[in-house]
Image (cartoon, rainbow, N blue to C red):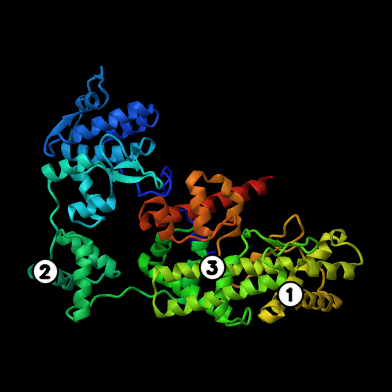
Amino acid sequence: MVWWMQVECCRCTTGRDDAVPPRPSFRTRAIEELNRHLSFAPEAARVSRLEAAEALIREIDSDRAYPIDFLVYRLTGYRPEDVVDEQVVGSALRWDLVTMIQNASRKCPLPWDGPRGQPLDMDAVAARLGCARRTLRGLRRRGLVFWWMSPTDGPPRLGCPPDMLEWFIEHVGVPDVVGVDSQRRHKIIATASQLEPGSGLADLVRRVAAELGIGESIVRGVLRRAVDRGEVALPSARRLQRREATVALRSLRQGVAVVDIARRLRVGVPSVHRALRRQRLAVLDRCLARGCLKVDVGQEGLMDAAPPLCWDATVVPHVHHAGGVGGAAGLVETLAAAVSTLRVCREKVHARSSEEVFACLDRALVDMTRCWWALLQQLGAAMGAALAGWARCAVGEIPSPVLAGVLGPMVDRVIETVRKSSVSDGPRLQDRVRVVSDRFLVDPPERGGMPMGASEARGVFLVRHTPWRWLLPDPRWERVMGGLRGDDALLASQRFALEGERLHAAGECARMRGCSVQAIAARTGWLRRRLRELVRTQGAAARAD
C-alpha cells in the first residue's frame, strides 16, 4: 500500500443517514440552527414547524430581505426577546427552508394515504414537469419541496405532496427545456477550440460551461457529437498504466475513495473506473487461465448452492467441516458451476461493458470464492488425518511452532491438487488430498515463523491462499461490522457480501431503498472509508493491549 493512499478523504460524510441522496448544505446560519433544534423536538412539534416552513415558502419573494425575528415567529410562533439585526435574502431563505423540510422530515415522514393525498415520488414529479430527474435538484431553489414519505410496500423515500406540486406549477411554472440551437452549438465549439486543452476533457468542459453560463452536461454532449463528426479535436483522458491500475485496485479494496485515487493519479473519476474494470478482468484472465477446475459450461445452474461462508474463513485441520451441499463431491460440482458462470460473464464483459454484466461477474466471483473455501474446509479432515499420522498425536497436541511451519505450505500443496482436478474427481478428492499431504510430510520444510494472520484456532486464513484475493472484500471488515448501525450494516453486508449475505448490485440496493444508484454508490464509498477506519481503530487497540 502506497503511503499517499493512506490519507483519509477530506470530504467526510459523517451525519448522513442511511443510503439516501446527499443532504444539501444550508446557506443561512439561523435556519441551520433551527434545523438542529428540530432533531430534539417531539414529532408533533416537528411536523407543525415543517408545515409552517412550507406555507412560508409560498409567500417568499426572492428579491426581498426578511428579518430573523420575523422568520422565528412564523416558524415557531414565539417572538424572541432579543432583537437580532440580521436579514436573509428571499432566494437563500427559500433554499434553506426546502432543505430543512427534506432533512427534518426523515424522522416524521408523510403518510402514504394521509389527508394531503398520496405523495408523488421523484420519477412521477419529473414526468409531471416534463424534465429529467436530475433537474429536480435545481428546482429546490425555486421552491419545490420534497418530504420523506413512508409507502406501504417499501422503505421511506422522497416524495412531493400533490397540493405542493400543483402550487409550484401554477405560481412558479414548468421549467423550460434548454435546447441547443445551431448558434449556441457553434459558440460552444468555438470557445472550446480557443481555450487551452488543460489537463483533460473534463477540465475543458468545466471551463467552457463556466465561461458561457451553460450546464456542463450540455457542453459535454455538444463536444462529443462534434468529435464524432470530426469538427473538433479534443484532448483524450490519460490511460492509466498497469502498475497504476494495480495500486488503484488495492487502494479501493482498503477503503480509499475513488475521487482521492483520481486526484492523486491526476485523471478523471471515469478513467479510474475504466482502469479498475480492466485490472479486474486481467486478474481473472490470469487466474482462470490456470484451470481451477476442468468444467462444462452447461453446469452453471448449480451456482445457487454456494454455501454462505464468511470472508474471515480459516482451514483448521483437526476440525471436520460439513460440506453443506453434498460433501466434497457436491462442492466440486458447485465450484465448477461458479467457474463456468464466471468465464461466461468474462466473455460478455469483453464484448460489451455494461453494468448488468459486471454485476453478474461480481456475483459469480463471490460464489466461486465461497465454494472454493468451503471445499478447502471440507478437505481439512484429510489434512488433519495426515498431520496426526505424521506427528503420532492429535493435531491439537502438535506444538504451535511445528504446526505453523508445515500447515501453510501443505495447504498450498493441497490447493495445487484441487486446481488440477476435474469434476469427475470429486468423490476421490479426499483420498487424493490425504496422499498429497502424506507425501509432503515425508520431507516437510524447516521450522518457520508463525504465518501472518494465523488465528487462535491454529488455522490458515484462506484469503491469503486465494489467487484473486485483490478482487475480494477485505476479510477484516466482518470483524468490525458491529461499529455500523441500522441500514448501514445491512447495506455493507449486501454490497460486499459480508456475514453470509449474497452479493447485491447497486441497482438492486437502489430499488429496495427507493433511491438512485448514484446515492447507493456514494454511500458505498462512505462505507468503505468507515470500515477501513474501524479496522485501523481495532488494530491500534489490539496493539495497545
Which image quadrant: the N terminus? Answer: bottom right
Q: Which residue is mark 3?
A: 471
Which of 237/483 is in front? 483
Pointer 1 with pointer 3, Cβ within 8 A: no
Q: Nearer the viewer, residue 294 or 18?
A: 294
| Amino acid bearing label 2 | Lys
Can residue 7 be seen here? The reply is: yes
Instruction: Estimate the spatial distance between the alpha carbons at disc 1 and disc 3, rounded to whole Å.
Output: 22 Å
Q: Give whichever of discs 2 and 1 has the lower sequence position.
A: 2
Seen at 45% across and 55% down, the residue is: 524
In the image, residue 274 lies at what x, y percent? Answer: 40, 71
Helix, strand or loop status at disc 2:
helix
Residue at disc 3, secondary structure: helix
Q: Nearer the viewer, residue 292 or 455?
A: 292
Mark 2 = which residue?
Answer: 187
Q: Callout 3, which amino acid?
A: Leu
Outermost residue to the right: 392
How dense is the environment of label 1, judged by Cα within 10 Å: few (below 14), some, or many (20 and up)? many
Q: Residue 433's spot in the image, x, y percent?
A: 77, 75
Quarter residue 278 falls in? bottom left
Task: Point out the frontmost of discs 2 and 1.
Answer: 1
**Residue at image mark 1:** 414
Mark 2 vs mark 3, CA separation in Å: 46 Å
